[in-house]
Image (spheres, rainbow, N blue to C red):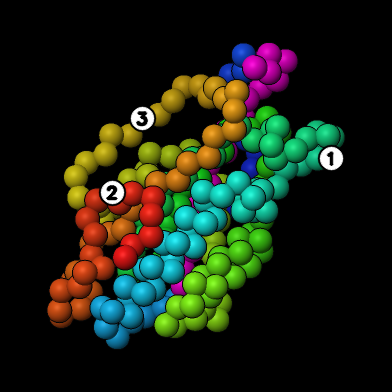
Amino acid sequence: MNEPFSSTPLSRVVSDAHPSENVKSSNFHILINTNHQYKNAESMKDGIRCLYKSLNLIFCDPSSLKEIIKINTEKRPGTTFETDIGRIITEISIEYAKSGLHAHALMQVTHLTFIHVNLPAINAKFISLYNGLHPVIPLKGAYIHVDHIRDNLGNVRDYIYKHIGGTRKIRMRRGWDYPDKQEIRAHIVITNMVNSFSQESSCAHDGTVPLRSPD
């Protein structure tokens, strides 16, 4: 079995802020599935609320990201999350299918050292945050899978946005800069789920939604 949770980042460009070091980039496709099926639109709306807020709390909070992104201190002694992680940008799409209410996340990390994604930490953090929001149907467990994306990044982004109206231009960068100040951003969209039930539901959203929880 391969090791999808470990990264062997590619060297990109030499950073102006760190002239003696190669800036690295790693991309991770993270699937988070609640495994929940819903009998009506109102219960699904509650599930979307909890999933959205949980993802926001994980991918927009430096302390949460510090738990799930681990750096290799053996290869680079003295490194810390604050000094060796420069930028974390995550694009997330929430979907509903036969497999359940789930989300696809593409997390792009710019860093100076070797890193890996801690799958048990994501699992524990997600279940704790989700159930802490007092959902109508609590989580007994979740299916979470992480793939390290070494190429075809544009195809992964196309897949994440496959149910979103309109066309997104994929911009592939030749090099990666290292910011002077750590930057963490997340962009969450909710697909149109109006056809999941016979009646229309106010939980259907098309396109981009701001970084706040659904009503």
Helix, strand or loop for disc 2:
loop
For the C terminus, which image quadrant? bottom left
Residue 177 sits above or below residue 32 on the image: above
In the image, residue 28 lies in the stretch drawn in magenta: yes
At a point 83% along the width and 34% down the height, the residue shown is 78
- Label 2 or label 3, whichever lies nearer to me, is 2
Of the two numbered discs 1 and 3 on the same chain, state the one appearing first in sequence.
1
Where residue 147 appears, x then y in whole percent?
Answer: 54, 52
At a point 39% along the width and 50% down the height, the residue shown is 211
Helix, strand or loop for disc 1:
loop
User: Mark 2 to mark 3: distance in Å?
Assistant: 18 Å
Amino acid type at image mark 1: Glu
Where residue 111 appears, x then y in whole percent?
Answer: 63, 33
**Camera sees residue 79:** yes
Amino acid type at image mark 3: Arg
For the N terminus, which image quadrant? bottom right
- Provide the residue span drawn in magenta: 17-34
For the stretch drawn in magenta, what is the main secondary structure?
strand
In the image, residue 131 lies in the stretch drawn in magenta: no
At a point 31% along the width and 58% down the height, the residue shown is 190
List the residue tagged with mark 3.
Answer: 171
List the residue tagged with mark 1.
Answer: 74
User: Mark 1 to mark 3: distance in Å?
Assistant: 34 Å
